[in-house]
Image (cartoon, helix red, strand yellow):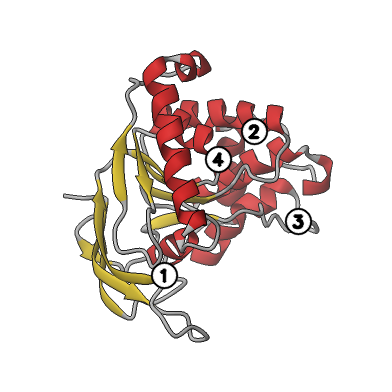
Amino acid sequence: MSALEFDHVSYRYPEDDFDIIDDLSFSVEPGSFHCVVGVSGCGKSTVLRLTCGLLRPKSGTIRINGAPIQGQSRCCGYMPQRDLLFPWRTVGENLALPLEIRGGYTKAQRRELAEAALEDVGLAGCAGKFPGELSGGMRQRAAFARTMLAGGDLLLLDEPFSALDYLTRVSMQEWLLEQWEKHRKTILFITHDVEEAVFLSGSVLAVDQTPIRRLSEILVPAPYPRTRACLARPEMAELREELIEMLRRQVEV
């Protein structure tokens, strides 16, 4: 059973006269890590918003773990580009928010789960701090922990590291792989960064045309666990150049 399946899905924004997603079908397997790459504005983020129910498809069916997403709750966690931590709530209170909304937990239980989640991402002792007291990388770790607490085995990450400086971004990429290897959630990760996609993915899902009618799956020739040294291998450099050339062709059309 696929962790996620798009079955002939189409979507059109109300202000457009064309379908940005046009009869798209693809699936991903449980526990896999896929980066989705494509040029700006091609519809990558729309795929994630459809998956988590923020948008409703014009036609077709989206299934998570074999069941249509309509009526499902806690089927996935969604992390947008900005961390969206509320500045007036402590970090612990921000993490506890999805539990608070869901209901069924006492305040003490929410606090305990939030503190455990922070410890899991290397932020033990930060529950009482406010978001403004954290660095950019620490805020993204906290946002990731909140996404994990939202529930589900499918994580949708929309360019979560794009606003970070280069060294922090590299550190967060390595950290995210460690988290994935520990928990083996299914991850769809949107990025404009080809090197990031090659380093993180088991296979890259490439948008090679707009509207999106297919996602071309390209296997990454490097086993897990990985270090950044794998990027220097000739086959990884070749894949990186192949993806860059594919994106360049789209821009020139």
Query: Whole-Å distance between the Cαs marked 1 and 4?
Result: 26 Å
**Secondary structure state at the residue bearing disc 4:** loop
Residue 60 against residue 136 in the figure, above or below: below
Question: In this view of the protein, can residue 153 be seen by the observer?
Answer: yes
Q: Of all residues shown, which one is farthest toward the front?
A: 252
Q: Residues within 10 Å of mark 3 (few under 14, many from 20)?
A: some
Residue kind at label 2, given as amino acid type: Arg
For residue 89, which numbered disc appears in the image?
Answer: 3
Asked whether the beta carbons under mark 1 and mark 4 sit within 8 Å of each other, the answer is: no
Which quarter of the figure has residue 5? bottom left
- Judging depth in this view, the residue of 191 and 38 nearest the camera is 38
Q: Residues within 10 Å of mark 4 (few under 14, many from 20)?
A: some
Taking the image as shown, residue 57 lies to the left or right of residue 1, namely right
Residue kind at label 4, given as amino acid type: Asp
Q: Which residue is mark 1?
A: 53
Query: Whole-Å distance between the Cαs marked 4 and 2?
Result: 11 Å
Q: Nearer the viewer, mark 2 or mark 3?
A: 2
Query: Whole-Å distance between the Cαs marked 4 and 3?
Result: 32 Å
| Residue found at x 52% / y 18% | 228
Q: Nearer the viewer, mark 1 or mark 2?
A: 2
Q: Which residue is mark 2?
A: 169
**Secondary structure state at the residue bearing disc 1:** loop
Q: Which residue is mark 4?
A: 193
- Sequence-first tag of 4 and 3: 3
Q: Residue 33: horizontal and vertical position, in percent?
A: 37, 38
Query: Whole-Å distance between the Cαs marked 3 and 1?
Result: 26 Å
Residue kind at label 1, given as amino acid type: Gly
Q: Of all residues shown, which one is farthest toward the right?
A: 133
Q: Residue 155: horizontal and vertical position, in percent?
A: 43, 49
- Sequence-first tag of 1 and 2: 1
